[in-house]
Amino acid sequence: MVVIALLCWIRYFLTHNSNNNERKCNMSSEKKGMIAASLAYVIFGLSYLFSKVALEIVDPILLLSIRFTVTFLILNLLVATRLLKLNLKGKKLGGPILLGILQPVLYFTLENYGLKYTTTSLTGMLSALAPIFTTMVGALILKEMPNRKQWAYICVSIVGVLMVSLKPGSGENTLLGCAILTAAYFAGAFFSILSRTLSKEFSPFELTYIMFAVGFVFFLALAFAQNGGQTVGLMMNALGKGEFLVSVLYLGGLSSVGAYLLANYSLAKLPVARSSIFQNLGTVVSVLAGVLVMGDSFTWVSLAAFILILCGVWGVNATN
Protein backbone atom coordinates (compact mmCIF):
# COMPACT_ATOMS: atom_id res chain seq x y z
CA MET A 1 0.00 0.00 0.00
CA VAL A 2 2.88 2.37 0.77
CA VAL A 3 4.39 1.73 -2.68
CA ILE A 4 1.04 2.38 -4.41
CA ALA A 5 0.53 5.57 -2.38
CA LEU A 6 3.97 6.87 -3.39
CA LEU A 7 3.33 5.98 -7.02
CA CYS A 8 0.03 7.89 -6.86
CA TRP A 9 1.92 10.93 -5.54
CA ILE A 10 4.43 10.63 -8.41
CA ARG A 11 1.51 10.41 -10.84
CA TYR A 12 -0.02 13.58 -9.36
CA PHE A 13 3.32 15.39 -9.50
CA LEU A 14 3.85 14.53 -13.17
CA THR A 15 0.30 15.22 -14.38
CA HIS A 16 -0.60 18.32 -12.34
CA ASN A 17 -0.88 21.32 -14.67
CA SER A 18 -0.17 24.92 -13.83
CA ASN A 19 -2.71 27.64 -14.62
CA ASN A 20 -0.09 30.32 -15.14
CA ASN A 21 0.69 31.92 -18.48
CA GLU A 22 2.65 30.07 -21.17
CA ARG A 23 6.04 31.44 -20.18
CA LYS A 24 5.54 30.51 -16.53
CA CYS A 25 4.31 27.06 -17.58
CA ASN A 26 7.54 26.48 -19.49
CA MET A 27 9.59 27.53 -16.45
CA SER A 28 7.45 25.30 -14.24
CA SER A 29 7.87 22.37 -16.63
CA GLU A 30 11.67 22.77 -16.57
CA LYS A 31 11.76 22.91 -12.79
CA LYS A 32 9.54 19.84 -12.58
CA GLY A 33 11.99 18.08 -14.89
CA MET A 34 14.85 18.85 -12.48
CA ILE A 35 12.80 17.74 -9.46
CA ALA A 36 11.81 14.55 -11.28
CA ALA A 37 15.45 13.76 -12.12
CA SER A 38 16.49 14.42 -8.50
CA LEU A 39 13.79 12.12 -7.12
CA ALA A 40 14.58 9.42 -9.71
CA TYR A 41 18.24 9.20 -8.78
CA VAL A 42 17.58 9.39 -5.05
CA ILE A 43 15.37 6.31 -5.51
CA PHE A 44 18.02 4.65 -7.72
CA GLY A 45 20.68 5.40 -5.09
CA LEU A 46 18.75 3.51 -2.41
CA SER A 47 18.11 0.57 -4.74
CA TYR A 48 21.67 -0.73 -4.24
CA LEU A 49 20.91 -1.33 -0.57
CA PHE A 50 17.72 -3.26 -1.33
CA SER A 51 19.45 -5.22 -4.11
CA LYS A 52 22.17 -6.28 -1.69
CA VAL A 53 19.55 -7.63 0.73
CA ALA A 54 17.66 -9.48 -2.01
CA LEU A 55 20.82 -10.98 -3.55
CA GLU A 56 21.61 -12.69 -0.25
CA ILE A 57 18.48 -14.81 -0.86
CA VAL A 58 18.38 -15.41 -4.64
CA ASP A 59 20.76 -15.24 -7.61
CA PRO A 60 20.78 -12.19 -9.95
CA ILE A 61 18.70 -13.78 -12.76
CA LEU A 62 15.95 -14.94 -10.41
CA LEU A 63 15.94 -11.53 -8.69
CA LEU A 64 15.56 -9.71 -12.01
CA SER A 65 12.73 -12.04 -13.09
CA ILE A 66 10.84 -11.48 -9.82
CA ARG A 67 11.57 -7.75 -9.86
CA PHE A 68 10.19 -7.20 -13.34
CA THR A 69 7.23 -9.52 -12.76
CA VAL A 70 6.29 -7.31 -9.79
CA THR A 71 6.94 -4.22 -11.91
CA PHE A 72 4.68 -5.43 -14.73
CA LEU A 73 1.90 -6.37 -12.29
CA ILE A 74 2.04 -2.89 -10.71
CA LEU A 75 1.98 -1.20 -14.13
CA ASN A 76 -1.12 -3.18 -15.12
CA LEU A 77 -2.74 -2.38 -11.77
CA LEU A 78 -2.20 1.33 -12.45
CA VAL A 79 -3.83 0.91 -15.87
CA ALA A 80 -6.73 -1.21 -14.56
CA THR A 81 -7.55 1.33 -11.83
CA ARG A 82 -7.16 4.20 -14.36
CA LEU A 83 -4.62 5.95 -12.19
CA LEU A 84 -2.52 6.28 -15.33
CA LYS A 85 -3.61 6.10 -18.96
CA LEU A 86 -2.15 3.82 -21.59
CA ASN A 87 -3.01 4.73 -25.18
CA LEU A 88 -0.94 2.86 -27.75
CA LYS A 89 -3.55 2.67 -30.52
CA GLY A 90 -2.09 3.60 -33.91
CA LYS A 91 1.40 4.21 -32.50
CA LYS A 92 4.49 2.46 -33.87
CA LEU A 93 5.97 0.41 -31.01
CA GLY A 94 9.37 -0.36 -32.57
CA GLY A 95 11.08 2.59 -30.83
CA PRO A 96 9.74 1.85 -27.31
CA ILE A 97 10.57 -1.86 -27.72
CA LEU A 98 14.14 -0.89 -28.64
CA LEU A 99 14.11 1.35 -25.55
CA GLY A 100 13.22 -1.70 -23.45
CA ILE A 101 16.02 -3.71 -25.05
CA LEU A 102 18.52 -0.97 -24.15
CA GLN A 103 17.11 -0.65 -20.64
CA PRO A 104 16.41 -2.79 -18.71
CA VAL A 105 17.53 -5.79 -20.83
CA LEU A 106 21.00 -4.79 -22.07
CA TYR A 107 21.89 -2.41 -19.25
CA PHE A 108 21.00 -4.73 -16.36
CA THR A 109 22.48 -7.83 -18.03
CA LEU A 110 25.76 -6.13 -18.97
CA GLU A 111 26.11 -4.39 -15.60
CA ASN A 112 25.56 -7.61 -13.62
CA TYR A 113 28.20 -9.50 -15.62
CA GLY A 114 30.56 -6.53 -15.68
CA LEU A 115 30.48 -6.31 -11.88
CA LYS A 116 31.57 -9.96 -11.75
CA TYR A 117 34.86 -9.19 -13.52
CA THR A 118 35.82 -5.82 -12.00
CA THR A 119 36.54 -4.29 -8.59
CA THR A 120 34.15 -1.88 -6.90
CA SER A 121 36.58 1.00 -7.41
CA LEU A 122 36.74 0.51 -11.19
CA THR A 123 32.95 0.16 -11.31
CA GLY A 124 32.64 3.49 -9.49
CA MET A 125 35.08 5.17 -11.88
CA LEU A 126 33.23 3.96 -14.96
CA SER A 127 29.82 4.89 -13.52
CA ALA A 128 31.21 8.38 -12.86
CA LEU A 129 31.95 8.68 -16.56
CA ALA A 130 28.38 7.65 -17.54
CA PRO A 131 27.10 11.27 -17.67
CA ILE A 132 29.97 12.11 -20.07
CA PHE A 133 29.01 9.16 -22.30
CA THR A 134 25.41 10.38 -22.32
CA THR A 135 26.36 14.01 -22.95
CA MET A 136 28.68 13.07 -25.83
CA VAL A 137 26.04 10.89 -27.50
CA GLY A 138 23.44 13.65 -26.99
CA ALA A 139 25.74 16.21 -28.59
CA LEU A 140 26.35 13.95 -31.61
CA ILE A 141 22.78 12.79 -32.19
CA LEU A 142 20.51 15.50 -30.74
CA LYS A 143 22.96 18.40 -31.24
CA GLU A 144 22.47 19.34 -27.57
CA MET A 145 25.97 20.66 -26.91
CA PRO A 146 26.70 21.90 -23.36
CA ASN A 147 28.54 25.19 -23.05
CA ARG A 148 31.99 25.50 -21.50
CA LYS A 149 30.69 26.28 -18.02
CA GLN A 150 28.41 23.24 -18.10
CA TRP A 151 31.32 21.01 -19.17
CA ALA A 152 33.34 22.41 -16.25
CA TYR A 153 30.55 21.65 -13.76
CA ILE A 154 30.15 18.14 -15.24
CA CYS A 155 33.85 17.56 -14.56
CA VAL A 156 33.53 18.94 -11.01
CA SER A 157 30.72 16.48 -10.25
CA ILE A 158 32.66 13.58 -11.76
CA VAL A 159 35.73 14.41 -9.65
CA GLY A 160 33.45 14.11 -6.61
CA VAL A 161 32.26 10.66 -7.67
CA LEU A 162 35.84 9.54 -8.33
CA MET A 163 36.87 10.68 -4.82
CA VAL A 164 34.21 8.41 -3.36
CA SER A 165 35.05 5.51 -5.67
CA LEU A 166 38.87 5.50 -5.55
CA LYS A 167 39.42 3.06 -2.73
CA PRO A 168 40.60 -0.55 -2.65
CA GLY A 169 38.01 -3.00 -3.93
CA SER A 170 37.67 -6.74 -3.65
CA GLY A 171 38.17 -8.86 -6.73
CA GLU A 172 40.30 -8.44 -9.82
CA ASN A 173 39.95 -6.17 -12.83
CA THR A 174 39.88 -7.72 -16.28
CA LEU A 175 39.74 -6.20 -19.74
CA LEU A 176 36.54 -8.17 -20.36
CA GLY A 177 34.87 -6.70 -17.28
CA CYS A 178 35.89 -3.16 -18.23
CA ALA A 179 34.56 -3.66 -21.77
CA ILE A 180 31.25 -5.09 -20.53
CA LEU A 181 30.68 -2.24 -18.05
CA THR A 182 31.55 0.36 -20.69
CA ALA A 183 29.01 -1.25 -23.02
CA ALA A 184 26.42 -1.11 -20.21
CA TYR A 185 26.92 2.62 -19.69
CA PHE A 186 26.78 3.29 -23.42
CA ALA A 187 23.49 1.35 -23.49
CA GLY A 188 22.32 3.70 -20.73
CA ALA A 189 23.44 6.70 -22.79
CA PHE A 190 21.53 5.57 -25.88
CA PHE A 191 18.52 4.87 -23.64
CA SER A 192 18.53 8.53 -22.55
CA ILE A 193 18.77 9.77 -26.15
CA LEU A 194 16.03 7.47 -27.42
CA SER A 195 13.73 8.26 -24.48
CA ARG A 196 14.08 12.00 -25.17
CA THR A 197 13.37 11.43 -28.87
CA LEU A 198 10.32 9.21 -28.25
CA SER A 199 8.88 11.65 -25.69
CA LYS A 200 7.45 13.65 -28.62
CA GLU A 201 5.06 10.78 -29.41
CA PHE A 202 4.72 8.77 -26.19
CA SER A 203 3.96 9.80 -22.61
CA PRO A 204 6.49 8.93 -19.86
CA PHE A 205 4.11 6.23 -18.59
CA GLU A 206 3.68 4.66 -22.03
CA LEU A 207 7.44 4.43 -22.47
CA THR A 208 7.87 3.02 -18.95
CA TYR A 209 5.11 0.44 -19.55
CA ILE A 210 6.61 -0.89 -22.80
CA MET A 211 10.16 -0.88 -21.37
CA PHE A 212 9.19 -3.13 -18.52
CA ALA A 213 6.91 -5.31 -20.61
CA VAL A 214 10.07 -6.15 -22.60
CA GLY A 215 12.07 -6.62 -19.38
CA PHE A 216 9.35 -8.84 -17.87
CA VAL A 217 9.28 -11.18 -20.89
CA PHE A 218 13.06 -11.35 -21.26
CA PHE A 219 14.07 -11.95 -17.64
CA LEU A 220 11.20 -14.35 -16.89
CA ALA A 221 12.17 -16.41 -19.96
CA LEU A 222 15.81 -16.31 -18.80
CA ALA A 223 14.81 -17.53 -15.32
CA PHE A 224 12.83 -20.44 -16.80
CA ALA A 225 15.76 -21.31 -19.07
CA GLN A 226 18.03 -21.39 -16.01
CA ASN A 227 15.75 -23.10 -13.46
CA GLY A 228 13.18 -24.94 -15.57
CA GLY A 229 10.11 -26.18 -13.72
CA GLN A 230 11.50 -25.06 -10.36
CA THR A 231 11.22 -21.37 -11.28
CA VAL A 232 7.75 -20.68 -9.84
CA GLY A 233 8.56 -22.57 -6.63
CA LEU A 234 11.80 -20.63 -6.17
CA MET A 235 9.99 -17.34 -6.76
CA MET A 236 7.23 -18.13 -4.25
CA ASN A 237 9.75 -19.34 -1.68
CA ALA A 238 11.70 -16.08 -1.95
CA LEU A 239 8.56 -13.93 -1.77
CA GLY A 240 7.60 -15.72 1.43
CA LYS A 241 10.54 -14.10 3.22
CA GLY A 242 9.71 -10.70 4.68
CA GLU A 243 13.02 -8.95 3.97
CA PHE A 244 13.00 -10.16 0.37
CA LEU A 245 9.38 -9.08 -0.16
CA VAL A 246 10.13 -5.56 1.12
CA SER A 247 13.23 -5.36 -1.09
CA VAL A 248 11.48 -6.55 -4.25
CA LEU A 249 8.53 -4.21 -3.68
CA TYR A 250 10.98 -1.32 -3.49
CA LEU A 251 12.95 -2.51 -6.52
CA GLY A 252 9.91 -3.47 -8.61
CA GLY A 253 7.65 -0.63 -7.50
CA LEU A 254 9.57 2.51 -6.61
CA SER A 255 12.92 1.83 -8.30
CA SER A 256 11.40 0.52 -11.53
CA VAL A 257 7.95 2.08 -11.99
CA GLY A 258 8.43 5.26 -9.98
CA ALA A 259 12.06 6.11 -10.74
CA TYR A 260 11.92 5.29 -14.46
CA LEU A 261 8.65 7.18 -14.82
CA LEU A 262 10.39 10.20 -13.27
CA ALA A 263 13.53 9.66 -15.38
CA ASN A 264 11.56 9.44 -18.63
CA TYR A 265 9.64 12.58 -17.63
CA SER A 266 12.86 14.51 -16.91
CA LEU A 267 14.34 13.43 -20.26
CA ALA A 268 11.24 14.82 -21.98
CA LYS A 269 11.72 18.20 -20.27
CA LEU A 270 15.50 18.68 -20.06
CA PRO A 271 18.48 18.34 -22.43
CA VAL A 272 20.29 15.04 -21.82
CA ALA A 273 23.37 16.73 -20.30
CA ARG A 274 21.25 18.41 -17.63
CA SER A 275 19.17 15.33 -16.92
CA SER A 276 22.02 12.79 -16.91
CA ILE A 277 24.20 14.73 -14.44
CA PHE A 278 21.63 13.89 -11.76
CA GLN A 279 22.93 10.30 -11.97
CA ASN A 280 25.72 11.37 -9.65
CA LEU A 281 23.17 12.10 -6.90
CA GLY A 282 22.68 8.34 -6.77
CA THR A 283 26.28 7.99 -5.59
CA VAL A 284 25.66 10.40 -2.71
CA VAL A 285 22.48 8.57 -1.66
CA SER A 286 23.99 5.07 -1.93
CA VAL A 287 27.05 6.05 0.14
CA LEU A 288 24.88 7.73 2.79
CA ALA A 289 22.64 4.67 2.92
CA GLY A 290 25.73 2.52 3.49
CA VAL A 291 26.86 4.81 6.31
CA LEU A 292 23.49 5.07 8.06
CA VAL A 293 22.21 1.51 7.54
CA MET A 294 25.26 -0.71 7.00
CA GLY A 295 27.68 1.14 9.29
CA ASP A 296 30.17 2.08 6.56
CA SER A 297 32.78 4.71 7.40
CA PHE A 298 32.32 8.38 6.53
CA THR A 299 35.34 10.68 6.22
CA TRP A 300 36.16 14.28 5.38
CA VAL A 301 37.05 13.06 1.90
CA SER A 302 33.49 11.75 1.56
CA LEU A 303 32.10 15.11 2.68
CA ALA A 304 34.31 17.01 0.20
CA ALA A 305 33.26 14.60 -2.56
CA PHE A 306 29.56 15.15 -1.81
CA ILE A 307 30.02 18.94 -1.96
CA LEU A 308 31.72 18.66 -5.37
CA ILE A 309 28.97 16.36 -6.70
CA LEU A 310 26.18 18.66 -5.54
CA CYS A 311 27.96 21.78 -6.84
CA GLY A 312 28.42 20.10 -10.20
CA VAL A 313 24.77 19.06 -10.47
CA TRP A 314 23.64 22.56 -9.48
CA GLY A 315 26.08 24.27 -11.87
CA VAL A 316 25.08 22.24 -14.95
CA ASN A 317 21.41 23.14 -14.43
CA ALA A 318 21.95 26.74 -13.33
CA THR A 319 24.29 27.64 -16.20
CA ASN A 320 22.73 28.36 -19.60
Image: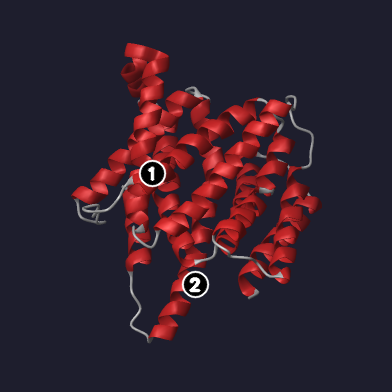
The amino acid at mark 2 is Lys
- Mark 2 sits on what residue? 31
Q: Is residue 149 above or below residue 99?
A: below
Image-quadrant location for residue 223: top left
Residue 234 spot, x, y in % from top left: 37, 18
Mark closer to the observer (1, 2): 1
Q: Which residue is mark 1?
A: 211
Counting labels gives 2
Could you say where residue 137 lies in the image, as x and y percent from the top left? 60, 53
Q: CA distance from mark 1 to mark 2?
A: 25 Å
Q: Secondary structure at mark 2?
A: helix
At 32% across and 50% down in the image, what residue appears? 4
Residue at 33 percent of width and 82 percent of height: 19
Q: Position of residue 184 (x, y in %)?
A: 58, 38
Q: At numbered mark 1, what does the secondary structure look like: helix, strand or loop?
A: helix
In the image, 193 versus 256, the foreground residue is: 193
Residue closest to the far top: 229
In the image, residue 57 above or below residue 274: above
- Please tell me in which quadrant of the rendered image residue 126 appears: top right
Instruction: Tell me which amino acid carries mark 1.
Output: Met
Instruction: From this view, report whether residue 118 is shown above or below residue 253.
Output: above
* Residue plotted at (44% across, 85% down): 23
